[in-house]
Amino acid sequence: MHAMRRLRIRNVAKFATSVSALSLILFSLVLTCSQPASALPAFARKYGLRCSACHESWPMLNYFGQKFKDNGYQLMNDRDAPIWQNPGYWPVVFRITPFWHRVSTGKVLVDTYSGGTAVGQAVQRISSSGFDLSGLDFHTGGTLEKNISFYLLPSSDPTGAFHFEQVFVRFDNIGHSPWFNFKLGRFELDNLLSEKRILTLTGNGGIYQTYHFIPQGDGNIFGQMGDNQLGIEYLGHSVDDRTRISASLVSSSDGNVNLSTTANAYTGFFAASQAFDAGRLGVQRIGFYAMAGEASTYYLTSGGIPILGSGIGNKGFTREGFVGQFYFGSHVGLTVVTQHGSDNAWFGQGYGNAEATDGNGGTTCTAAPCPPNNVPGTTLPVGSQAPSWNGVTFEGHYIYSPQLIFIGRYEVEKMSQQANGSGYNPAFTGANGLTGPTPSDFGNISTYTIGFRYNPFMTSRAGLAWHNEYNWLHQDGTGPSLGLSSANINTSEILLGLDFDF
Amino acid sequence: MRTRLRKWSLWLGAAAFLALPRTSSAQLSTEQLNAWENAPTAVSHIGNLTGHAKDAAGDYRRYCVGCHGELGDGNGENAKWYEPPSFPKPRDFQLGIFKCRSTPSGTLPTDQDLFDTIARGMDRSTMPQWSTFTKQERADLVAWIKHFSPRWANEKPGDPIKIPPEPEVTPERIKAGREVFARVQCWKCHGVQGRANGPSAPTLTDDLGRPIAAYDFTEGSRPKCGDTDQDIYRIFMTGLDGTPMPSFADNIKPDEAWDLVFYLRTFMHQHSKEKEMAKQLNLKPIDPNAPAGQP
């Protein structure tokens, strides 16, 4: 019975695979025969430039696009003010991505049953697939007046719940100097390899692990360079944008609005880079960045109820590294980002993020895991130490044409010092949920992503990319050990979809 | 699992393989494709650099084709949306006629002229400053631009005009410039105060019959062909080919051209010593109806 069923399922699966694959090929043929569409992306429509003028592949910027952005979304041609636009012009772009994906997660702890009763747990790989949808982005941006630019990006999750992903006003070229530009609002830090313009879309491959790495059990969610942050930014650059320098001061709230947690704590981010003319190889750029901040590890309570905006017990963290953008002619590019990160030992023990799973922080948390609070009199366990790590991201591109780009990325994040040092009580479970001294490779990540984006047409009016991607991620020691020789986890995802904007 | 993945990879590979050969030609007709494949033998010489047209095809397609078109005829997909005179139409490279030159009116520009124009951009148009290219890439693009027009096969660029050293600006020179401004009737297009509101301004058209605006010296934008004193001097002497701005090389002497540069500076938005001097002189706009010799 079971064998017959398995056979039937296998036949159905085989048929489905063949149909899907044939559809894929037919679809690719349809795409290759497509004609230019005529919808209206905001900047390309305003200036009449094709997407490829500013993007290696949308949304990743090329050097000219970076210069355009640094000038406050202006070409600096005295036609930047909105007064020059047709009154019907509205600087808005919609973006959404319908796709099919298959996710396979290794070593998931699942309940086992016997006679309809749960009898224990086992570890198994879970693979699932289906059609899906990304959130919807409403990009609006441009100039309010010459040298006053703005960006507003209400963004929804796949269920339609909206938040403000990016909102800022920027005063550009103050005193007619490109060296003085100030931005206020919520924005992406000045990362040369921009996560908000990432070319990949899978769950693990759609972010830069280097920008988000947090040691296991660490409570510092505030040092994530990839997230849009709330604050102010100064940026200065040479006229040709070869030299760039920026400094930001942001709230240590990981971009969350309202002064709910970690109020009174700030983070500074500094970045500088210099580009060089390398003949036919293209313009090469090298730079560095440094992020240093503080975040509170506890906030005051009144009658056990947390007092909003009262974060205290600030502790420090740092992130620093180098960035290189290298081109080898007009077809091949490689971007490298390194990072050394370090958190205060309190963060390593799980203090910092005061958001509880039940929505209550401080001492009112009712559902585990509750965030630990650094209340007066709290001491760190013996053997606690500041966690630190090193990471690197390599992202290579092969640009067959402005309409077709192949992407390959490899990232590795390795702990250099665990929060629970060798002196940690082997029988003790700390506030970070980890027991005893932690193995040196615990939580290390390595991941690669490969894929391509193909734009069947390219105009200044709309964008449509056929997106194909595969991601594989490995993490050391974080899976259930349940009688296994290794607790390492491997996760993979394949994604095929359409990324379009208009 | 591995077998299924391999199968999917094969299907994906096949789909990509089918798509690839079409990508480069997705928007080109056969005629256009032939032009792309057969044309690029032109070269350019910028100092020690030699630009090759064949190496610029990718950059032209990525950055320029939306306005200037696959065939360089100025009929890119966006051209029809530009409404002169606010937004001039893209240059038709096939004509081989260029505004910004160091060479006499009617002659081809030098490679250096085109090289500089790419980096400088064209103010008050959608041609940005392409200073993001390497010098080699720009030199290659110059060669690419040249391959569109048969003029380069049959003619040589003109010899760059000589620009004498800039004299010291004096109140007398500014007053003399005012007289030149009246005599050669700059005011007819540019207006007596340089506001581009002269009596001929509304009727101006380029060589292709499209409306074109005279330069408004007062609005603060940069002159199209550069904003140094030498650049402005050069414009008088070379003219802007394809536009109603003629060359005055036969009408004014080099010294008078410098006087005119100084006088025009008094109109301009930017602070300058010429403006200061004009203020001290209490210089009034010219009177177009004044008897000859009394501007």
Image: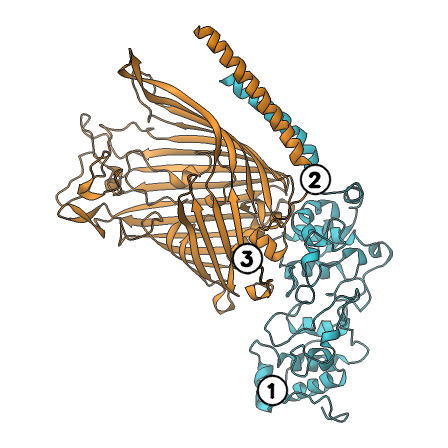
Chain colours: A orange, B cyan
Q: Horizontal placement of A141 versus B196: left or right?
A: left
Nearer the camera: disc 3 or disc 1: 3
Instruction: Kindly indicate whether the residues beneath marks 2 and 3 are on one polypeptide chain.
Output: no
Amino acid type, callout 3: Trp
Separation of marks 3 and 1 at Cα, in angstroms:
44 Å
Separation of marks 2 and 3 at Cα, in angstroms:
29 Å
Disc 2 chain ID: B
Q: Picture coordinates of residue B223 (x, y %)?
A: 65, 70
Judged from the image, the secondary structure of the residue bearing numbered disc 2 is loop
Residue at the spot 47% in from the left edge and 10% down from the top edge: A5
Identify the mark at residue A90; answer none if there is no mark. Answer: 3
Instruction: Write down the residue under mark 1.
Output: B278
Identify the mark at residue A293; answer none if there is no mark. Answer: none
- In this orientation, which residue lies closer to the viewer: B168 or A305? A305
Judged from the image, the secondary structure of the residue bearing numbered disc 1 is helix
Instruction: Write down the residue under mark 2.
Output: B26
